Image (cartoon, helix red, strand yellow):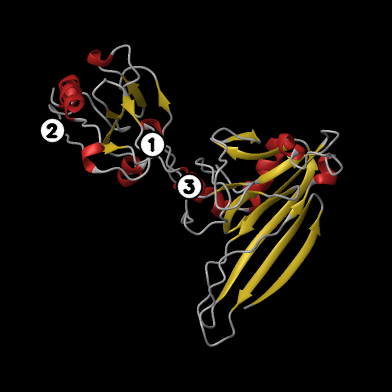
Amino acid sequence: MIIDHLIKAEGDKVSFRLIAKNPTGQKSEAHWGQPCIRVGEFTGTRKDANKYAYLKDSFVFLNEKKSFMPTDNWATSARYLPGQVWCPCHVPKTDLNPRPLSMDQPSNGLIGCISADKKWLMATAWDPYQELFQGVIRCLHSDFRIGGLEVGEEKIIRGAIYVMANDVSTLIKRYEEDFPAQVRRHRTLSDPEVVAGDPVSGKRVSITTPDYSGTNVHHTLYLPENWNPDWKEKKKSYPLIVEYSGNRAPSLGSSGRVEDSVLGYGLSSGEAVWLNLPFVDANAQMVIIGGAMKPQQLPTPRRLFRKLWQSMESILIA
């Protein structure tokens, strides 16, 4: 494989345009590259005895907000330690750097840090990108994705390193101007936040049925944006998706929590009644299933489902 580089300095950024080519007679299995940006000097932590002191000034974007490290749900186990990986929606979780994998999906392709005097920021992005990675030598990565090359195939990969005044809104604007296709991919479908309250159209709410009052047992219910409580009179119907949380598997991005289930929303694009049910044990406690359990070990949800269905009849069968 051959990669031609065009690197340009452009005011507040350095831009990269790579052309990856496979001139050989066999398929290339090269999947990603790792531009490693050392930020110790920039953050003023190069001589700090704690080589991870730069984390407190380093950030990614989660839930559309700048999140400083260590972020929530910081992973600490993997084949190789330490570090942290954030996987975008378009990359298989089996095709990543074998470092600790956050269960949180990045809101965009940016990763960056703040200067020692807090006046400047540095951030980087690539399109397409494989992962965001907080490295092990005072470094930050937006690793670009190649995805293999067929015989004679060429792919164009673009990247940028921004160095600008510490103004996140300006950074986001520059990023969105430079990577509009990536922005559209990230915004194509975003599962709704879980909120409290009564079920209404376009909201995903957390509900505890009366039988489980005072316990941690709850479920979530999402009604699509075009939901009409008079659907029966209007002869309108909606698909119903009932989903149980997957096993807790942080390396695969699954927390096992009801709130973090997303398959039903993704399958229906938010156009179905989407119900997430928990597993409940004999002591009326919600259970997060971990690892590979035998069928006889799994708590039964039948009693909960029966009670839940009774409480939903006024909404779904009115």
The N terminus - image quarter: bottom right
Residue tagged 3: 251
- Left or right, residue 21 beside residue 306: right
Q: Is residue 226 above or below residue 161?
A: above
- Which label's residue is closer to the chain start, 3 or 2? 2
Measured as percent of width and height from the top left, residue 178 is found at 65, 53
Q: Earlier in the sequence, mark 1 or mark 2?
A: 2
**Closer to the camera: disc 1 or disc 2?**
1
Q: Residues within 10 Å of mark 1 (few under 14, many from 20)?
A: many
Q: Mark 3 or mark 2, which is nearer to you? A: 3
Q: Which residue, given by chain and number where applicable, does mark 2 sit on? A: 235
Q: Residue sitting at 87 percent across and 42 percent down?
A: 47
Residue of label 1? 256
The structure residue drawn at horizontal position 64% and vertical position 35%, both measured from the top left corner, is 70
Expressed as whole percent of the image width and height from the top left, the position of residue 19 reads 64, 72
Q: Secondary structure at mark 3?
A: helix
179 or 252, nearer to the observer: 252
* 291 to the left or right of 306: right
Up-down relation of residue 63 to residue 186 (above or below): above
Report the side of 159 relative to 183 (left or right). right
Residue 143 - label: none
Foreground pick, 196 / 259? 259
Q: Secondary structure at mark 2?
A: loop
- Looking at the rendered structure, the kind of residue marked 1 is Gly
On the image, which quarter does residue 245 sit in?
A: top left
